[in-house]
Image (cartoon, rainbow, N blue to C red):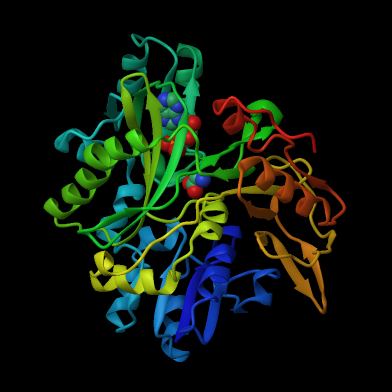
Amino acid sequence: MNILVVGGGGREHAVIQALRKSAKVETIYALPGNGGIAKDALCFPVKANDVAGITAFAREHQVDFAVVTPDDPLVLGCVDELEKLGIPCFGPEKKAAILEGSKVFSKQLMRKYGIPTAASETFSDAEAAKAYLASCRYPVVVKADGLALGKGALIVNNYAEAKDAVEQIMVKKVFGASGDRILVEQFLTGPEVSVLAFTDGTTVVPMVSSMDHKRAKDGDGGLNTGGMGTIAPNPCYTKEIAAECMEKIFLPTVRAMNAEGRTFRGCLYFGLMLTPDGPKVIEYNCRFGDPETQVVLPLLKSDLLEIMLAVREGRLSEVPVEFSDGAACCVVLASEGYPEKYETGFELTLPRTKEGEYLYVAGAKQEGEKLFTAGGRVLGAAATADTLEEAVIRAYALAARVKFGNAYLRKDIGKRALAALGREFPVL
Ligand code: AMP
Ligand code: GLY
């Protein structure tokens, strides 16, 4: 089969490497892909949010199946447009992608169907929001309604910060129309867990759980980033909690979407917080997480393409979805200075990988035979092993063999997870 993957980051590289293992796959096209992905797929310079360009490409290249991975094209209706051409897709239609596209929508859905989440108020008027914030107990979380490159949630500690957040989002429109409405949300505490789940609208199959490390610096300091590393499975997510989430969150969400006439098919991402009152939804994403996918897919033993086809055809209950018992760790190598100012254009040298080691390139371009850095996050070095300690050691050893001029990485990916298990972080 000829497969089209829309997107060009580390997550897409992980999806492409997993798809390549399927016997059915002949050619993989990536739009736009990147210089590193070009080793594993044919990359063409069509942007991931250029829906017209993507459909034109698919029409010309006899694509048998498309995997739409990033949030923007999903929310823009890329799946709907490809399906209109008769190209079956993995990923939700536009009317289901709203689960990520509008936090106001998802909050209303959770309230209507009794799915546990933080209490919140919605505002479409800045003055009304400020008046409400004048009487709040702090901290609270101010969230832009729409997509905001993962930066739309601001934790504010007092009224002055809250007013500033409203000003930025609703008046200065730093996230554009995504800030036409905001949510003011109760601040929750507890360990965070990411759970990606395959669903065909009837069956829900959660993948192995994971833990992101969003802050730029060791010890969870510094600014929020797109993710500096991940581990799987997440030790805070016990079998009992998993069963509770299935009953109170996962199945109710899928059923609620059906009841609303918005059947969700694809990968549904549950961002959960394990609060003292039980697990609650922090956010939904309508797609694979980045960099969660970079630790989840290396642990998948089953054929990813077969699962994706089954999701599309409504027969997910009939295919095996098995994960190995081991652990995985992904360490992100970023350009020094990320997520603020950073330089690019450094030559990037990638080592050979051994069994159980993976390099997932996020920001690189190819010039002749050489690769050069081209983004804030350059790549993820991931590894699997029997234990989390070994996976951490292997991922860092792999990261050390990657060379580019201004490489920066956190040195504590997995430390929090090991602490939750009462275990020591290995000496690297
Ligand atoms: P979001 O964009 O909704 O995923 O939020 C980004 C991050 O902000 C989350 O991963 C949490 O760390 C934090 N966050 C979001 N909502 C809340 C909340 N209600 N209470 C505490 N932290 C939150
Ligand atoms: N890792 C969080 C996300 O993909 O949105």
x and y, in percent, of residue 120 in the image = 29, 25
Q: Dividing the image into 4 quarters, which one contains the N terminus?
A: bottom left
Q: Dividing the image into 4 quarters, which one contains the C terminus?
A: top right
The answer to whether any part of residue 153 appears in the image is no
Relative to residue 61, is residue 353 depicted above or below?
above
Left or right of 69 in this view: 247:
left
- Residue sitting at x 50%, y 67%: 48
The answer to which quarter of the image holds residue 362 is bottom right
- Residue sitting at x 60%, y 70%: 33
x and y, in percent, of residue 129 in the image = 33, 22
Left or right of 51 in this view: 80:
left
x and y, in percent, of residue 296 in the image = 51, 54
The answer to whether any part of residue 179 appears in the image is yes
The answer to which quarter of the image holds residue 131 is top left
The answer to which quarter of the image holds residue 221 is top right
- Residue sitting at x 40%, y 30%: 273
- Quick one: 358 or 72, which is closer to the camera? 358
Residue situated furthest left in the rendering: 259
- Residue sitting at x 70%, y 31%: 425
Relative to residue 404, is residue 420 depicted above or below?
above
x and y, in percent, of residue 397 in the image = 79, 50
- Quick one: 282 or 373, which is closer to the camera? 282
